[in-house]
Amino acid sequence: LFHVSNPDGDKGKIRISASLKFYADLKEHGCEGFLKGVYGDNMVDPESGYDVSLQYDYDSLPENKEELATKIALLKRNCFASVFDKYFECQKSGGGEKSTAIVHYRDQETMYVSAQKDRVTVIFSTVFTDDDDVIIGKVFMQEFKEGRRGSQTAPQVLFSHS
């Protein structure tokens, strides 16, 4: 859920706030520090009822407004990226992370991320309730798995269905 507003009615400023059901999970893995690195001083205290807020002054916008708009539009993606950044950095430094990130990003759907010395493992646990979605999911994953055979450097793909 996103909310765009002028804080305190100030038409010279714009605030973009986001509420993510899984933000508490992301926060445990350094989301706020990562976002601060991406958005800098434009990351402000969250608006009431939201998890993260960005604020910009119209008078000090950069020349490339399109680039800024894209950066703001990637807020949710960057929240997720914080987990991957943490575990890829851990793997890159040669140490395995003792914990596993567990992010409950939707009802009955969870993402797990862990790092070992030689790889980062990402697992998406997804539940398809519609019969058509089950079939499409099976076909997609099978094609994904088959596509791996064409490249020796592609990551391993495992999937199960029941």
Image (cartoon, helix red, strand yellow):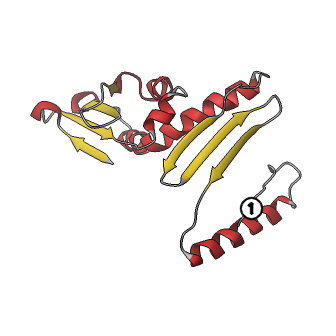
Rendered image quadrant of residue 39: top left
Residue 20 percent location from the top left of the image: 40, 43
**Closer-to-camera residue (81/27):** 27
Residue that carries the numbered disc 1 in the rendered image: 160
Q: Quadrant of the C terminus?
A: bottom right
Report the residue that reaches farthest toward the left.
Answer: 9
**Closer-to-camera residue (39/113):** 113
Instruction: Decide if residue 102 is in sight here.
Output: yes
- On screen, residue 125 versus residue 16, left or right, reads right
Residue 32 percent location from the top left of the image: 45, 26
In the image, what residue occupies the spot 46% across and 41% down? 22
Instruction: Decide if residue 61 is in sight here.
Output: no
In the image, what residue occupies the spot 55% across and 53% down? 109
> Callout 1, which amino acid?
Ser
Residue 105 percent location from the top left of the image: 50, 47
- On screen, residue 59 versus residue 18, left or right, reads left
Residue 78 percent location from the top left of the image: 49, 38
Would you place residue 30 above or below residue 71 in this image?
A: above
Report the residue that reaches farthest toward the bottom.
Answer: 132
